[in-house]
Image (spheres, grey):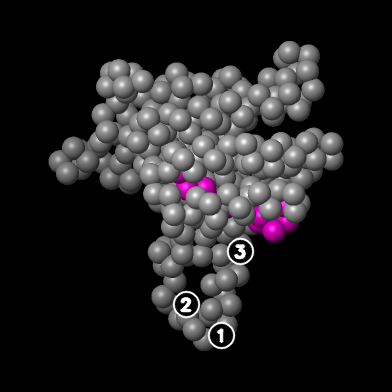
Amino acid sequence: MNQIITDTTHPSSLPEHVAIIMDGNGRWAKKQGLDRSFGHQNAVKSVREAIEICGDLGIPYLTLFAFSTENWNRPKREVSFLMKLLARTINSEIRELYEKGIRLSVIGEIEALPDYVKTPLNKALELTKNNTKATLIIALNYGSQAEILRAVRQISEEVKSGKLDPKDIDNRLFEQNLYTQDIPPVDLMIRTSGECRISNFLLWQIAYSELYFTDVLWPDFRKEHFMEAIRSYAERERRYGKTGEQIKTE
């Protein structure tokens, strides 16, 4: 792994925060004549590899889009399977995360999740809360538009109660009311399966992130595919509204 890293990237050009829309589980299973549930089961290995390579590269923040607010509209059988798979995965993987020094964090409306998911999830959050090597953020029952509306309501209540002057509302204050208040903006957003859309994911947080779309279905996504995304990121010039000449001068 060290040889791969040396040959393809330099630490100064690595992203601090990578977010992934893990797409294509159902299509992966369908291509093999299997039920969609098999795609979700086989996606766990891809999650492990993404976490491992972030650790190898020294990327401190990884966010995975596991279940959206819109995913409740899927067939009840599939939703039930996803929830049970989530609970099993938390139970089976959390000890390793803890031993690797990874802190688990969750964004989304987790109160709406079933108790058999919330119970192991809360235990995992408590177990890893003091870990500092890296942070794994799982987006569960998450939708970015709902997150932004939630922030607006919270700020509106502060204004209504007289605790906040509308003139004091700025980007920093708004970000303090998002789920990601203690997490840096996304530098690199990856979406698998060939779909080229954001799907209501971290809309505020990806304002200046680099977007990377790959045709690889998520259950097939491995370290070499992750490294391709990292190489693409390292070759890009991030200008944040400035000109290329300004960036070079700075």
Q: Residue furthest right?
A: 76
User: Nearer the viewer's eye, disc 2 or disc 1?
Assistant: 1
Q: Which residue is mark 1?
A: 161
User: Which sits in the foreground, 51 or 35?
Assistant: 51
Which residue is under mark 2? 166
Residue visible at 46% across and 40% down in the picture: 99
Q: Where on the picture, by quarter, is residue 237?
A: top left
Q: Secondary structure at mark 3?
A: helix
- The image position of residue 60, as x and y in percent, is 39, 42
Label 2 or label 1, whichever comes before in sequence order: 1
On screen, 6 above or below 57?
above
Q: Which residue is mark 3?
A: 150
| Label 1 element class | loop
**Residue at the location (44% across, 57% down)?**
182
Q: Earlier in the sequence, mark 3 or mark 2?
A: 3
| Camera-side residue of 203 and 114 | 114
